[in-house]
Amino acid sequence: MAAIRPSPTGAVLALATELKASGRDIISLGAGEPDFDTPEHIKEAAQRAIRDGATKYTPVDGTASLKAAIRQKFLQENGLDYPVSDILVSSGAKQCLFNLCLGLLGPGDEAIIPAPYWVSYPDMVRLAGASPIIVGAGIEQDFKIIPDQVEAAISDNTRLIILNSPSNPTGTSYSKTELQALGAVLARHPKILIAADDIYEHIHWASEPFISFAAACPELHDRTMTINGVSKAYAMTGWRIGYAAGPTAIISAMKTIQSQSTSNPCSISQVAAEAALLGDQTPVRDMTKQYEKRHDYLVSALNAIDGLDCRPGEGTFYAFPHVAGALHARGIDNDTDLVELLINKADVACVPGSAFGASSYIRLSFACSMATLEEAVQRIKRVLMA
């Protein structure tokens, strides 16, 4: 445990909450949580579930009806065909990933993780006793790793690669061609499992439609674990429902781990998730339109501040500007010190890029109102351009 860090994003959120409680007018751009409410038809389904007595244990891997809904979602939206026996429902996509690491990896194994990465990937790998192999891709290559980098990172001990598209923290999304190029390398290494973290699938506005890795590389379908959930797209972060689909043996191992840790996900949340997947998708599209408007504003506003360089994203609700110019201009040592300056002098909380394996960047969430974003930008500008 001495090698494992608490979540840096959780730490920023806790600090912002503490400062607000003390009377500070803090704008928190740290949390990766939609500011929208869960759509009404989903909440109503949960209320009916409570009244109907759906409050007991369910099968460890999820109810039959929710797994059928997930199977239908994969078929209709992704062109992926998984039998329900190869689907696992967990308490969030995070638990799916944790189960995967614990079920697949052990001492001596390696997992390739592109950086910038979601903060929990490396520590999940470490908790399984394995070693994370970090492959960096900065703003100069659009935060996307390339096939030569993957080939160079592979060793006899490589068992896993994690791909997150659209990406937290960068908003970058891989195209079909880019995924196929990575797949061509991975096809030559049959011992490697590909984990496709698609949690931001629907918060996506690139001209080219979103495509999941197994759909882009059908020849690797049997070596791909596709992971998703309802937290982000349906504004259901607190409901804690994620799901994974992939090779039978690994899903079975993940189910066993879950049976000895948390057992089944919340029964009421499973009913709500089913309503989310099968119900009206208009709220998802409406929320995504708002995220895109906020993205367009924030990227433009950040690029207008001296010392910041922000690449437009294709999805998620994060901006990830390169701040090396601001560090140099103000004589600040690193991105963590810059984040401390912003929270102390601008009353704006964000997350240092080093938490995501990328120094000299910061992550700002735009899962907040446009008015809040505009005020946050003005505060940042006053501090950095003083």
Image (tube, rainbow, N blue to C red):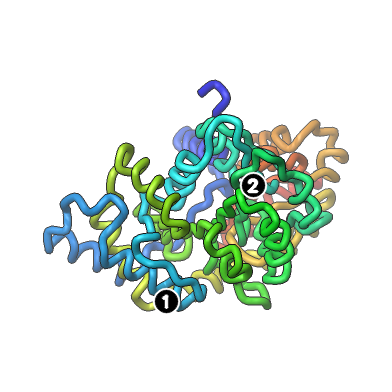
Q: 11 or 382, which lies in front?
A: 11
Q: What residue sits 59% from the left and 69% below the top?
A: 218
Q: What residue type is labelled 1?
A: Gln
Q: Which quadrant of the figure contains the C terminus? A: top right
Image coordinates for residue 11, horizontal then vertical, percent: 53, 35
With respect to residue 261, does 243 lie above or below? below
- Looking at marks 2 and 1 on the same chain, the residue that comes earlier in the sequence is marked by 2
Is 306 on the left-hand or right-hand side of 15?
right
Crowd rating for badge 2 (residues with CA inside 10 Å; few <14, some 14–19, many 20+):
many
Q: Mark 1 points at which residue?
A: 281
Of all residues shown, which one is farthest toward the top?
2
Q: Residue 336 occupies which quadrant of the picture?
A: top right
Q: Which amino acid does label 2 sit on?
A: Tyr
Which mark is in front, 2 or 1? 2
Q: What residue sits 60% from the left and 47% below the top?
A: 160
With respect to residue 211, does 138 lie above or below? above
Q: What residue sits 45% from the left and 75% below the top?
A: 75
Q: 162 or 169, which lies in front?
A: 162
Is 358 on the left-hand or right-hand side of 47?
right
Q: Which element carries disc 2, helix, strand or loop?
A: loop
Q: Which element carries disc 1, helix, strand or loop?
A: loop
Answer whether labels 2 and 1 touch (C-beta < 8 Å).
no
- Regarding residue 297, the answer to whether it shows in the image is no
Is 122 on the left-hand or right-hand side of 93?
right
Image coordinates for residue 163, horizontal then vertical, percent: 62, 55
Image coordinates for residue 243, horizontal then vertical, percent: 41, 57
**Which of the labelled discs sits on residue 205, or is there none?**
none
Q: Name the residue under label 2.
A: 117
- Regarding residue 167, the answer to whether it shows in the image is yes
With respect to residue 84, does 208 lie above or below? below
Q: 358 or 128, which lies in front?
A: 128
Is 55 on the left-hand or right-hand side of 273?
left
